[in-house]
Amino acid sequence: MGLRAMKVARTREQIVSIALDLFIEQGYDETTMEQIAEKAEIGNSTLYRYFPSKDLLILDRFTQSFEFGRLLRERPETEPLEVSLGEVVRESLRASTLDDERFAELRRLVDNAPGPRAKLWDLVASSTRDLEDALAERLDRSPGDLLVVMTARMLFAVYEIAGEKWWSGDHHASREAIVEDVLTDLARLTIVLPAPS
């Protein structure tokens, strides 16, 4: 990473950290972009260049690990798809910030703020579509193909289950170990699907 990219990443992280502290201290609705810019010692235009809206700031910790499509595209095309998908889940959980001590409070704030909550669903839907596109390319099928859609939804479910399992535990187990447990258990299952009439 070049010097400029490092500076951009550092500034971005500083903005997010300050904003999250303000959201927790004052509340989401009560915190303004101007307050965030002032506390971060940057101009309003700089803040808006990094984050065009306040909801993107509060959601940053949630969404930075939703890049499933990009991660799948970065895997070798010759790698078996199931191996690639396992690596996508592992990498996504490594990128998540579940261990940020503010995560529980941020989650509560997002759950109680209609704007960020709706934006989070939009971001999840967008990430799902991108994953479906990446899977369609890999499987040489259309994005709306049932195999593509179900595979994408299953990956999201595995990610969510592993994340929840880590979050609800004592945090001594590594995320990688929990992913392995979930994937091992899943491989043993005979999943019951709804039957056609």
Image (cartoon, helix red, strand yellow):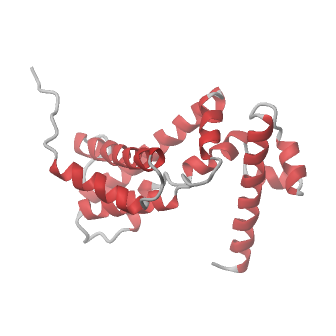
Position of 111 with respect to 87 (left or right) is right
Closer-to-camera residue (197/15): 15
Q: Is residue 44 in view from this perspective?
A: no
195 versus 159 height, above or below: above
Counting every numbered tag in the picture gives 0
Which residue is at a point 59% across and 42% down the rendered structure image? 104
Position of 68 with respect to 197 (left or right) is right
Image coordinates for residue 114, horizontal then vertical, percent: 63, 26
Closer-to-camera residue (132/31): 31
| The N terminus - image quarter | bottom right
Q: Residue furthest top?
A: 197
Which residue is at a point 67% across and 80% down the rendered structure image? 2
Which residue is at a point 88% across and 43% down the rendered structure image? 34
Image coordinates for residue 158, horizontal then vertical, percent: 34, 47
Which residue is at a point 74% across and 40% down the rendered structure image? 24
Position of 104 with respect to 89 (left or right) is right
